[in-house]
Image: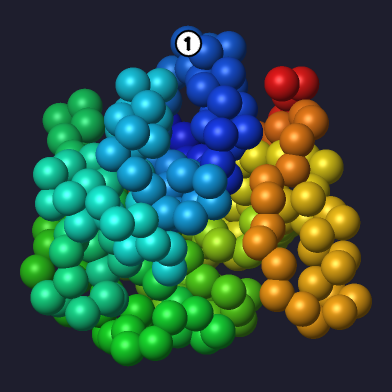
Amino acid sequence: MLKILFFSDIVGRPGRAAVKKYLEENKSKIKPDLVIANADNIASGRGPTIKTVDEMIEAGIDILTCGDHVYDQKEASLVLQDSDKLIRPLNYPKADPGRGYVAKKIKKTDVLIVNLLGRVWTAEGLDSPFSAMDELLKERKEKVIIVDFHAEATSEKIALSYDLAGKVSAVIGTHTHVMTADEQILKNHTAMISDSGFNGPHESVIGVVPDQSIYRFRTAMPIMFELAEGPSQVNAVLLEIDEKTGAAKSINRIQEIFNN
């Protein structure tokens, strides 16, 4: 049985610190075979950088996925080209820097990690995540397949989970920063959760200072958001996957709060 630990969106320095602390205190107890994390907000809430990617790899993350902020930082293209630890959404145009999946051999089992981006209320010019997965699955032979679906609409995430039920091991939703309580296993094979939450400031509006978010809602005026301070939360899911069949046997939410 493979144990896969998946951390949802890591938001800035508070999120990175919380994930590192969680791994320091729990990795030896959980003993995951593979650790994945979403890095779409890892550098001050705006995409990955070389420094932040290296920091999280050193902390014990094996693979980092991303989302609609993947190209926000000027050095993003360099990070994606030089690292086999960071992937971007598969359904961005093929000419864009980086790749949308990576394969790793874990305990003699080939594991495929895939990143997808939703098309409802996100970026323009994307291919269909449904069609992109159709094409990829025709080419790949791995039985254990983990999909990070970075999407805004819950309906789109649930629909893709049902579309991939029986074809992949797990579809983990990211992006909205609020952990949902709908984790389940579809067709006795595919684990899913609409959103796995976020890692970062607990006393915040999805990571940012509450007063700034309130001001934006009250006035509709633009404002430069800042990350909140105080205690940080860890949101993750722990999967157990049959390495022979690729079927998910369990999915469990992890929610903890740390004082910085």
The colour scheme is: rainbow
Which x, y percent locates residue 181? Answer: 73, 56
Residue 41: x %, y % from top left: 50, 51
Dot 1 crowding, Cα within 10 Å, few <14, some 14–19, many 20+: few
Above or below for 152 versus 44: below
Give the position of the N terminus as an image quadrant: top left
Q: Which residue is pictured at 40% across the width and 21% down the height?
A: 59
Q: Answer left or right for 35 relative to 19.
A: left
How many marks can you see? 1
Percent across and percent down for residue 139 are 9, 69
**Residue that badge 1 annotates:** 28
Q: Nearer the viewer, residue 185 or 97?
A: 97
Q: Residue at x 27, y 47 (%)?
A: 86
Q: From the viewer's perspective, is 165 left or right of 224?
A: left
Nearest to the observer: residue 186 or residue 253: 253
- Please tell me which residue lies in front, 146 or 117: 117
Helix, strand or loop at label 1? It is helix
Can residue 206 be seen from the camera position used here?
yes
| Type of the residue with mark 1 | Ser
Above or below residue 242? Residue 102 is below
Image vertical order of residue 19 relative to residue 199, above or below: above
Instruction: Determine the residue positioned at 86% across, 68% down.
Output: 215
Q: Is residue 52 left or right of residue 203?
A: left
Confirm whether residue 244 shows in the render.
no
Name the image quarter holding residue 63: top left
Location of the C terminus (image quadrant): top right
Q: Choose top left, top right, bottom left or bottom right for residue 189.
A: bottom left
- Identify the residue at horizontal 20%, vertical 57% (top origin): 77
